[in-house]
Image (spheres, rainbow, N blue to C red):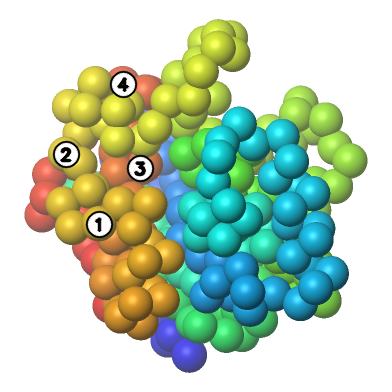
Amino acid sequence: MTDLYGFCNFLPYLCCEKNNFTMDLQSLKNILFLDLETVSGQASFDKLDDRMQALFVKKMRFAKTDQSPEELYADKAAIYAEFGKILVIGIGFFSFSGDKLSFRCKALKNEDESALLKEFSGFMENLTQKGSWKMCAHNGKEFDYPYLCRRLLINGLPLPKLLDIMGKKPWETPNLMDTMEMWKFGDNKAFTSLDLMAACLGVPSSKDDIDGSLVGKVYFETGDIDRIAAYCQKDVAVTAQVYMKLRNLGELLPEQIDIIA
């Protein structure tokens, strides 16, 4: 199990410290940045039982493709909470020390999804006891937040307070932020990837090794969860930097980003 104690020890300090930063920079306090890496629940379509195979085919009936169910499962299963699972949860927050700003990020990782989600839930409980927090993810409202909620319930686990959003309207969840939604400015025509936004805003790419489309391949062919976790942490840091750019709060230098093993 990932050791969160050292990571969590910074939280009371972050919540309570009075510093000389401008009010704008202080708006970065108490935001938990999040990113998920997901894979298909089984290594291949033929590993599903008959019922789940039939339900996956039904789910894909509107897909405009000539791909077989086996090919579709390899390509698409990971993005659906009903057929995928969470392998890595990247988390990060801004930390203030005197007049210095830094960003600390860590990846929770476990092939046992239930254990991973229990660890994440414990972290969230500890977090919300230390103050009022917000959460931010890229495309979080369409992917990360609902995926997390569904997988928690599928694993028989309660929803953390911050993610207890079942049936709520968007205006009833102001503590859940989404950098892609911020970028839309009311335009609903298209998805904008984190990498594209980062490129437009002058933020270095996180795709220097793998990207999201290769996570399943890396996991099922090599089992290298550490490589996936490293990529996830970079995505968390990029999301935080994109958020800063969207708020006109400057930028982070590489030495200000603290990757916690």
Position in image of residue 17 (x %, y %): 41, 55
Q: Which mark, by number, is residue 248?
A: 4
Whether residue 209 is visible:
yes
Q: Amino acid at mark 2?
A: Pro
Q: Quadrant of the C terminus?
A: bottom left
Looking at the image, is mark 1 or mark 2 nearer the viewer? 1
Looking at the image, is mark 3 or mark 1 nearer the viewer? 1
Earlier-in-chain disc, 4 versus 3: 3
18 on left or right of 41: left
Q: Is residue 2 above or below residue 209?
A: below
Position in image of residue 30 (x %, y %): 50, 49
Helix, strand or loop status at disc 4: loop
Where residue 47 sits, quadrant-wise, is: bottom right
Residue that label 2 marks: 204
Earlier-in-chain disc, 2 versus 3: 2
Q: Are marks 2 and 4 in contact (CB under 8 Å)?
A: no
Residue that label 3 marks: 240
